[in-house]
Image: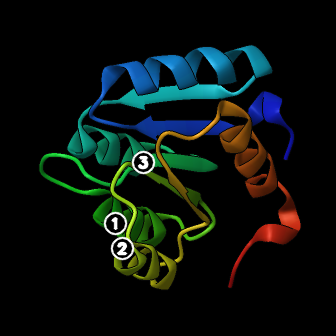
Amino acid sequence: MNQTNTRLLVVDDEPIVGKRLKQVFDKIGFAVETYTDSAAALAAIAEKSFDIVVTDLKMEGIDGVEVLKRVRAMNPKTRVIIITGYASPDTAELAEQEGVFAFLAKPFRLDELKEVIFRAMEPDRIKS
């Protein structure tokens, strides 16, 4: 998978997060869609497949773990990365059980997220 055809979806209730990540990953050549509403993001995921989904953990309505569960049910090959300002061992463990690819605590460095996303693109990284 190379980045020029990698489809990335970002869902975070803070618009600045999606805007910033879109700028960065558009420049690299990703096809990026951003959402501040998790229900709208899930509707988009139901319509078309994404290679990688980056989701905030704590959001109004549907939270990040539920986004993870639904994405994995719709497309098990999609890598899901959860970002959160509320990291706890319990939520990390729950996300791990649901097949999260990575769990990043906010504030994270952009390089950190890029590294995780590039790792997620490696074909041998698919978890069974």
Mark 1: few/some/many CA within 10 Å (<14, 14-19, 20+) = many
* Residue at image location 59% in from the left, 38% down from the top: 8
Please tell me in which quadrant of the rendered image residue 24 appears: top right
Q: Secondary structure at mark 3?
A: strand
32 up-or-down from 80: above or below: above
Mark 2: few/some/many CA within 10 Å (<14, 14-19, 20+) = some
Classify residue 73 as left or right of residue 124.
Answer: left
Please tell me in which quadrant of the rendered image residue 109 appears: top right
* Residue at numbered disc 1: 65
Residue type pointed to by label 2:
Thr
Q: CA distance from mark 1 to mark 2?
A: 8 Å
* Closer to the camera in the image, 92 or 124: 92
- Mark nearest the camera among 2 and 3 is 2
* Residue at numbered disc 3: 55
Residue type pointed to by label 1:
Val
Question: Residue lying farthest left?
Answer: 61
Q: Position of residue 110 (x, y in %)?
A: 66, 32
Q: Can residue 49 be seen at all in this image of the molecule?
A: no
Residue type pointed to by label 3:
Thr
Mark 1 vs 2, N-terminal side: 1
Mark 2 vs 3, N-terminal side: 3
89 up-or-down from 24: above or below: below
Q: CA distance from mark 2 to mark 3?
A: 14 Å
Q: Secondary structure at mark 2?
A: helix
Residue 91 numbered mark, or none = 2
Q: Position of residue 98 (x, y in %)?
A: 45, 79
* Residue at image location 35% in from the left, 80% down from the top: 90
Q: Position of residue 66 (x, y in %)?
A: 29, 65
- Mark nearest the camera among 1 and 2 is 2
Q: CA distance from mark 3 to mark 1?
A: 9 Å
49 up-or-down from 128: above or below: above
Mark 3: few/some/many CA within 10 Å (<14, 14-19, 20+) = many
